[in-house]
Image (tube, helix red, strand yellow):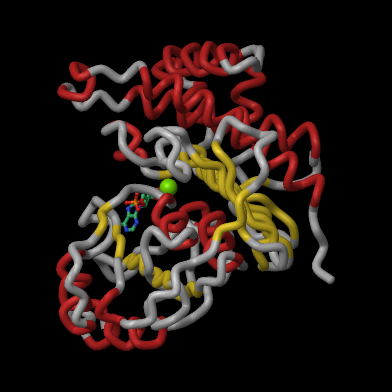
């Protein structure tokens, strides 16, 4: 019988809900003017505050667990980071976490582990920074990995819709290995969790596929060739962040392709771990582009994998064959 990790799950859900409050508050302050100026400071502030809040909760409940997070506080400790730090401190306070600048930096640095260990958490405080800035999709992703296995995956998706509720209700999705995948409206911790399952689409030509908005993160040319090969007639759903994993997990899409744009790029574990377990526990299948399982035993990178193929499990093998058949010459 798999462990149910009840305490760890409660901590992770609380932390992600609280981080989402910060992200939403900062996102709502983005103006058309700051967008036009391509001002990236809102995402920088929210990234740091989100990591501080999640790592604080992990520090309180599991002080011995290392956290491999995307951010470090080095930038904030420099004179040029002072303004960001004081804004991050203010955002934490607005979300109910009162702390000194030093404490905020310490929490952020708690997420600075990079080496593999038998038990660790991995965190992306804001996955899909471009989506965050465009006021589109982004996610807070947290996972617990033990002996290389993802045991808990949590995705906070503040701009996803929840079952007929108004747009932007937000979704909190989670999975514990062996216990299925679940979701709730993001700000309704007492709502009954809804079980999520992948779609049953089995005809490759009918697949609804999603991919990154950014062609620099996943090759759109390559996915176009794969779609033609499989006879897919629907346009791709382009979406930022691990919300794509949630889309496949709950059957909004059947396939998520992440196709390397250059040889040698190593995917980061925090861009995948939370989402992968949610899809697996919803009944889907996840491998890299050559059909290998993602290997979380190499620190902060998926050094033994390339790209990712995420499906509802029905046509996974056919998709992997099409991916390999159309691999650009410089990727082979
Ligand atoms: P997405 O929102 O799906 O486009 O993914 C966002 C993530 O892409 C970021 O968190 C980055 O870590 C990651 N990323 C950055 N550069 C690349 C790249 N060249 N290939 C794949 N992923 C990347
Ligand atoms: Mg990311």
Give the position of the C terminus as an image quadrant. Answer: bottom left
Quadrant location of residue 81? Answer: top left
Q: Nearer the viewer, residue 202 or 331?
A: 202
Q: Position of residue 191 (x, y in %)?
A: 65, 37
Q: How many marks?
A: 0
Q: Is residue 227 visible?
A: yes
Vertical relation: 268 (above or below) 27: below
Residue in view at x 51 percent, y 22 percent: 77
Vertical relation: 30 (above or below) 108: above
Q: Position of residue 216 (x, y in %)?
A: 23, 55
Residue farthest to the front, as pictured: 164
Residue in view at x 40 percent, y 87 percent: 317
Q: Nearer the viewer, residue 6 or 204?
A: 204
Q: Nearer the viewer, residue 16 or 185?
A: 185
Q: Position of residue 73 (x, y in %)?
A: 53, 30
Residue 93 falls left or right of residue 165: right
Give the position of the N terminus as an image quadrant. Answer: bottom right
Residue in view at x 64 percent, y 15 percent: 96
Residue 304 falls left or right of residue 321: right
Residue in view at x 79 percent, y 41 percent: 62
Q: Is residue 329 visible?
A: no
Quadrant location of residue 106? Answer: top right
Quadrant location of residue 80? Answer: top left
Q: Position of residue 142 (x, y in %)?
A: 59, 47
């Amino acid at each position: 019988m798999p462990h149910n990790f009840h305490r760890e799950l409660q901590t992770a859900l609380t932390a992600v809900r609280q981080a989402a409050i910060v992200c939403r508050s900062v996102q709502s302050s983005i103006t058309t003017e700051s967008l036009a100026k391509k001002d990236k400071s809102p995402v920088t502030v929210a990234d740091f505050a989100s990591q501080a809040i999640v790592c604080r909760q992990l520090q309180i409940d599991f002080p011995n667990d290392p956290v491999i997070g995307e951010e470090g506080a080095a930038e904030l400790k420099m004179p040029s980071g002072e303004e960001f730090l004081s804004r991050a401190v203010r955002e934490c306070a607005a979300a109910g976490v009162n702390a000194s600048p030093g404490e905020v930096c310490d929490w952020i640095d708690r997420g600075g582990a990079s080496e593999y260990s038998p038990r660790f958490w991995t965190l992306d405080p804001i996955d899909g920074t471009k989506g965050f800035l465009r006021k589109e999709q982004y996610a807070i992703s947290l996972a617990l990995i033990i002996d290389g296995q993802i045991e808990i995956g949590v995705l906070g998706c503040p701009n996803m819709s929840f079952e007929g509720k108004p747009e932007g209700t937000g979704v909190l999705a989670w999975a514990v290995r062996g216990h299925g995948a679940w979701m709730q409206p993001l700000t309704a911790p007492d709502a009954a969790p809804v079980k999520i399952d992948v779609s049953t689409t089995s005809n490759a030509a009918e697949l609804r596929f999603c991919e990154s908005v950014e062609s620099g993160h996943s090759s759109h040319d390559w996915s176009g060739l794969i779609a033609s090969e499989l006879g897919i007639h629907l346009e791709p759903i382009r979406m930022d962040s691990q919300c794509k994993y949630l889309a496949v997990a709950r059957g909004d899409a059947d396939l998520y392709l992440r196709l390397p744009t250059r040889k040698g790029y190593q995917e980061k574990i925090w861009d995948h771990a939370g989402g992968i377990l949610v899809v697996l526990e919803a009944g889907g299948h996840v491998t890299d582009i050559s059909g290998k399982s993602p290997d979380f035993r190499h620190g902060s990178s998926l050094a033994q994998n390339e790209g990712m193929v995420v499906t509802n499990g029905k046509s996974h093998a056919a998709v992997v064959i099409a991916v390999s058949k159309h691999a650009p010459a410089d990727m082979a």
